[in-house]
Image (tube, rainbow, N blue to C red):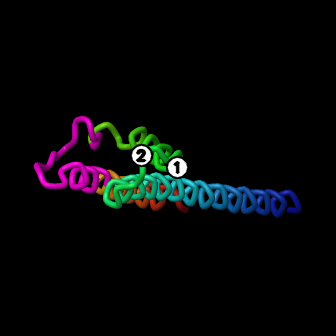
C-alpha cells in the first residue's frame, strides 16, 4: 500500500516537471520569434528613417535582418519590388514587414503547440 502511494507521488511530480519544461520551452520559442520579428522591423525602420549606413549598429541590424529574412523576403530578390519614388524604402518595409508577421504567426503557433 505504501508503494502505491509513492508511485502516485512520483508520477505527479514527473507530470509537473514535464509541464514546467513545456511551459518554459513554449515561452522560449515565442521570445525567439518575437526577437527575430523585432530585428526585421528595426531593419525596415532603418530604411524608412534613412539611417546612416556607416553606423555599426545599423550595419548589424541590417545584416541580421538579411540573415533572418527567410530567403523569400530578401531585398536582393524581394517578393515585391516597388518602383520610384522611394523604391528602396517601400521594398524594405513591405518585405521585412511580411517576414516579421510570418515570424510572429509561427512563434504564436509554436507557443500554443508546445504549451501544456
The residue beneath circle 1 is 57
Horizontal placement of 112 versus 11: left or right? left
Is the N terminus in the top left, top right, bottom left or bottom right quadrant?
bottom right
| Number of numbered tags placed on the structure image | 2
Give the magenta-colored segment's residue range: 73-96
- Other residues around mark 2 within 10 Å, as few (<14) / some (14–19) / many (≥20): few
Q: Is residue 88 found inside the magenta-colored segment of the image?
A: yes
The residue beneath circle 2 is 53
Q: Position of residue 86 (x, y in %)?
A: 19, 54
Q: Kindly tell me whether residue 116 is visible in this rendering.
A: yes
- Other residues around mark 1 within 10 Å, as few (<14) / some (14–19) / many (≥20): few
Relative to the observer, which residue lies in front, 101 or 46? 46
**Quarter of image, res 2:** bottom right
**CB of mark 2 within 8 Å of CB of mark 1?**
no
Question: Residue at 16% across / 47% down in the picture?
Answer: 80
Relative to the observer, which residue lies in front, 115 or 89? 89
**Quarter of image, res 69:** top left
Amino acid at each position: 500500500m505504501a508503494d502505491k502511494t509513492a508511485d502516485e507521488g512520483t508520477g505527479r511530480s514527473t507530470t509537473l516537471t514535464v509541464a514546467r519544461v513545456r511551459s518554459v520551452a513554449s515561452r522560449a520559442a515565442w521570445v525567439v520569434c518575437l526577437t527575430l520579428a523585432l530585428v526585421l522591423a528595426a531593419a525596415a525602420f532603418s530604411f524608412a528613417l534613412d539611417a546612416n549606413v556607416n553606423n555599426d549598429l545599423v550595419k548589424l541590424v541590417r545584416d541580421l535582418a538579411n540573415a533572418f529574412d527567410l530567403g523569400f523576403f530578401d531585398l536582393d530578390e524581394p517578393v515585391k519590388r516597388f518602383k520610384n519614388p522611394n523604391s528602396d524604402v517601400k521594398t524594405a518595409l513591405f518585405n521585412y514587414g511580411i517576414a516579421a508577421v510570418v515570424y510572429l504567426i509561427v512563434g504564436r503557433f509554436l507557443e500554443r503547440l508546445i504549451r501544456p
